Image (spheres, rainbow, N blue to C red):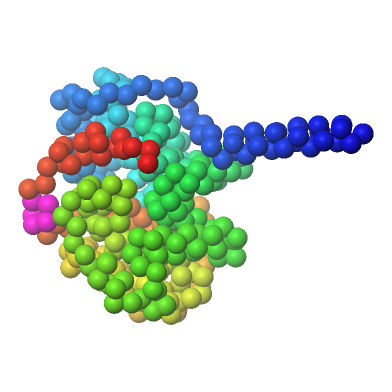
Amino acid sequence: MKKKLLVAIAAITCLAFILFQFGFNTVQTVNRSKSWEWEESPLSENANTYFWDHFHFGHYDSIPAILEGLTKAYLDNPNDFQTVLHLGFTHFWAIADRQQLEKIPASLIDHAVLAQKYLGEAYRMNPEDTRILSFLSAAKIIVGDLSEDDKLVTEGYFNGLKSIRDWKDFGEFSLAYTLSQVPHTDPNFKKALQWMRNTTERCYCSELDPPSEACKKAIARKVDNPKGLGRNRIVPNSWVAPHNIEGYFMSYGDLLVKSGNWEQAIRIYELAKYAPDYENWPYRDVLERRIRDAQLNVGLFRQPIVQGTIVGLDAAVMVQTSIACRACHQMSPQDLNSTYATFDRKKYLDQAYYFMDAA
């Protein structure tokens, strides 16, 4: 009897291990396999350049033209990695910044579905870049939520946890940003708060109550070549995200406001002002209003938003507004004409930028 029990326990343990490995480490995608190529054709180069130009200016109304160009390039060569990745990002941008629309159409869900498809393809091409998995995780959660598919939501969440294990700094922020829109009483909201705290302590400083002078100096440090930082490239501002620091601290402050800790939120909001490019940030006025209204916004940020409704820029946490992407990625005229006037996109976004070592 004892022998049978030991065998049963061993079998259950083995099954549990298999389920753990499958649930936590397996990433399902629409495409089951995908090869990749790096060389851009004239068609794909034009499409990718057009994407970056309009994405950096926050030209949401250019999305149909961006998608048309990228899709033509995709049909010409479906294995062009940059084209596939940018198709996924553009569809994701369409759903993320939907509050720029005067009216949100029901068909907008198609962008979420296609973001899941193309980001899945890009991940098959480059599974070592955890940033892609983080976006894919968010796309699955969005599609699962809209289609009432709890299993897909769970799958997306597990993919997000995998992204944290693979690249903690980017993965924790990404999943926390996605989950910042759940009710403040949800256990996952508390996890999101902790993940943001963890990321801030690792990437900027650990002395946050209140922020120390060393913390402010770390934020103010200008990094001329973020790519040279390896995986820490996600910490400073860069050509890809010209106002990464400002957007990060505004989103973290929003979570703290929603949690009820509006006094600490003000201190976190204030850290955005130490970013080296803060004076060029297009959304300084939004931050100032959040600082001024932090206590009042506790109740406002907790209000549920009915699917398909338009909300004001000051009426919700950042991820639910029209600047969900733009807060970090939009360039100002000063950025374009001064900071990045001589920037070489192709030299910076080379193969090594995306296809990093697994370490």
- Give the x, y percent position of residue 334: 12, 59
Quarter of the image holding residue 113? top left
Front-most of residues 274 and 215: 215
Taking the view exactly as shown, the residue that stands out farthest to the right is 1
- Give the x, y percent position of residue 58: 25, 51
**Image height of 59 relative to 339, above or below:** above
Quarter of the image holding residue 319? bottom left
Q: Is residue 165 visible from the viewing direction of this image?
A: yes
- Give the x, y percent position of residue 91: 36, 39
Residue drawn 41% across the image and 29% down it: 124
Residue drawn 79% across the image and 37% down it: 9
Residue bounds of the magenta highlight: 337-341
Q: Is residue 17 magenta?
A: no
Quadrant position of the N terminus in the picture: top right
Q: Main secondary structure of the magenta part?
A: helix
Residue drawn 42% across the image and 77% down it: 209
- Give the x, y percent position of residue 190: 55, 63
Residue drawn 35% across the image and 60% down it: 203
Q: Is residue 254 left or right of residue 299?
A: left
Q: Is residue 333 visible from the viewing direction of this image?
A: no
**Image height of 292 relative to 281, above or below:** below
